Amino acid sequence: MKPDTFLEADCRPAINFEPRRCGLRPTILLLHYTGMASAEKAAEWLCTAESRVSCHYLIDEAGRITQMVSEEMRAWHAGESCWAGETDINSASIGIEIHNPGHGLAYTTFPEPQMQAVEALSLDITARHRIRPERVLAHSDVAPSRKRDPGEKFDWARLGGAGVGLWREPAMIEGDAGFGRGDEGEDVARLQQAFASYGYQIEANGCFDEATEFVVTAFQRHFRPALVSGRADHSTIKTLNRLLEAVNAVA
C-alpha cells in the first residue's frame, strides 16, 4: 500500500477493511482519539483481526502519520453512528485516529506537533475529496450516546482558523440554567429540530430526554468546549444558530 497523501507518512496495513458500500464516497472526515496508553498499543490493536476496528490514518503525539487503510476502502472506525440521516458512516467517511489516552485514562491536551500533523492531513483530505466544512466531525457528533472523542481538549478552533471544518466563535456563557433533563414544550422541540437540521440524530419530540442530553453534550465538546454541561443554555443555543446560519449562507 502506498500512502494516498502527499505528506510524509508511514504505512502499516490494517486487516479490517472492505469496499465502500452502495456507491458511497468519502463526504465526511471523522476525527477520533485512540483512548489507549500509547500510540504503539493503538497501532497494534488497529492492525489485529480480533479488534474488529481499523482506521485510515493514525497520528501519534510527535505528529508522525501512519496510513493503515487505503482511502478508497471502508475502514471500521465509526461503529453504530449517524449523521444527516446517513447510517453507514464508515462507507461515507475517512477516519483519523489521533493518539490521546482519552477520558478513561489521562486525558490531556493535544501537543503542537500532533496538531500540526492533524491540520495538514485534514487540509489535504478535505481538498482532495471536496469535503464540506460542516462535515468535518468528531466521533462524538455521529455517536453521541456512545463516544466522547476527540473531546473538549481538542483544538477545533485552530482547525477552523486553518480552513478545516466549520467553526464559529462560541457565544458568551451567561450563567443561565437553560433547558435540561425533563424540560418539555415547543421551545425544546424547536431546539431538537435545530440540532437535527445541523445533522445530529435526534427526534423533535419536545421532551429534553437522555438522548437530547447526549446530543447537547456532544455539541458542547465540539463547538462550546469551555463548559460541557449537557444543558442547553443561551450560549449553546446561540452558538448552534451561528453554525446553522453559516451553513445556510452557502447552501
Image: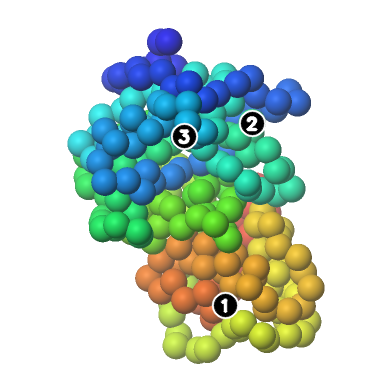
Q: Indicate left or right for 79 with 47 as reference.
A: right
Say what secondary structure mark 3 lies in: helix
Q: Residue at x 43, y 36 (%)?
A: 96
Q: Which mark is residue 212?
A: none
- The percent position of residue 159, horizontal first and vertical second, equals 39, 46
| Residue hosting label 2 | 91
* First along the sequence among labels 3 and 2: 3
Q: Residue at x 50, y 89 (%)?
A: 176
Q: Indicate left or right for 244 with 32 as reference.
A: right
Within 10 angstroms of label 3, few (less than 14), some, or many (20 or more) residues?
Answer: few
Q: Nearer the viewer, residue 127 or 65?
A: 65
| The residue positioned farthest toward the bottom in the image shown | 176
Q: Which mark is residue 51?
A: 3
Q: Indicate left or right for 32 with 207 as reference.
A: left
Q: Which mark is residue 232?
A: 1
Q: Are marks 3 and 2 in contact (CB under 8 Å)?
A: no
Tell me the kind of residue under disc 1. Answer: Ala
The nearer-to-camera label among 1 and 3 is 3
